[in-house]
Image: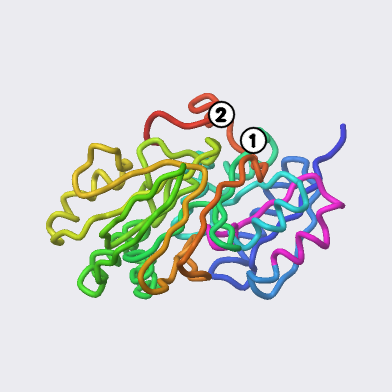
Amino acid sequence: MIRLRALLLINRKSRQGEANAQTAVEQLRDRGVDVLEGRFDAPEDVPAEIRRHADAVDVIVLGGGDGTLNLASKAMMACGKPMAVLPLGTANDFARTLLIPTDLAAACDNVVDGIDHGIDLGLCNDVHFLNVASIGLAVRASEYRSDAAKKWFGSLGYAANVFSAVRDTRAFDAEISFDGHTERLHSIQVAVGNGRYFGGGLAVSSDAALDDGQLDLYSLKPQPLSSLIAMLPGLVRGPHKAMQGLQLFEGTAFHIRTEEPMDINTDGEILTATPATFRVLPQALTVKVPQRYIDRYGSGKSSSAA
């Protein structure tokens, strides 16, 4: 029997990184996987490790959060090898979308037994994103992130940061062009989603999916904090077009202009700004997904919340 060869990339210098890496190596070898451990000093070195070793392995196993996966996405797209995810971050929105288990042993099972599945990648100007790119509230909320908030609030930490940021976020005007027409928005947040979840469990749309060849855009209208709190359950389930206080659009590309350049948060990092063009790159990556994802969604846009 031919043994599966895997490149394992986990930052041993991160919190609990050493223990997670050791456990992952043991779990994978127990499942008959030949493990090649990549060595790197910082997450920014992950793409170089992928390029260095991709030709020698069958699958690349990335342990970390959405930021690590984002950093790896361009190199993964170039090497053409399937990616398997060990969700070791705080939010793990990408893994949540694809129903990849957060339990490390179960995630290692998915490395071996998972099904190769093509997914889309988003592109904002020249920056790739897996989940969501945002303008407005999400940018300000990212400035309030802290290790303490992650520890005590977990996936709710992002929502708490958003509400803290409301008082400091000014409404802005934006012009979006897509599918041959233009919309003018007055907004406190514009989010463009490739995937379903962002911010630790908020959903960009009630039917967003990583494999539908579409981007989902929503604009949140200025409103009192009490109204935003009332909207939170709907933002967790995923907005729909009938939802008050919000505008929702779909397309394969969007162009967004604002009166002044505004920062854009892509998968938690501020790497570009408006004016911006957003595009979807269909089937750009291959990811190991569990059979239950295929059973539930098959391929294409999902019809209910995960």
Say if 101 sits above or below 122 in the image: above
Q: Residues within 10 Å of mark 2 (few under 14, many from 20)?
A: some
Q: Which residue is mark 1?
A: 117
Amino acid bearing label 2: Ser
Label for residue 299?
2
Q: Main secondary structure of the magenta part?
A: helix
- What stretch of residues is rendered in magenta? 46-69
Mark 2–mark 1 CB contact (< 8 Å): yes
The image quadrant that residue 39 belongs to is: bottom right
Helix or strand or loop: what does disc 2 sit on?
loop
Q: Nearer the viewer, residue 223 or 14?
A: 223
Image coordinates for residue 195, horizontal then vertical, percent: 48, 46
Q: Residues within 10 Å of mark 1 (few under 14, many from 20)?
A: many
Say if 92 sits above or below 11 in the image: above
Amino acid bearing label 1: His
Image coordinates for residue 245, horizontal then vertical, percent: 20, 49
Residue 220 in view in this figure: yes
Q: Residue at x 87, y 52 (%)?
A: 56
- Quick check: 121 left or right of 102? right
Helix or strand or loop: what does disc 1 sit on?
strand
Image coordinates for residue 230, horizontal then vertical, percent: 16, 50
Q: In the image, is residue 53 part of the stretch drawn in magenta?
A: yes
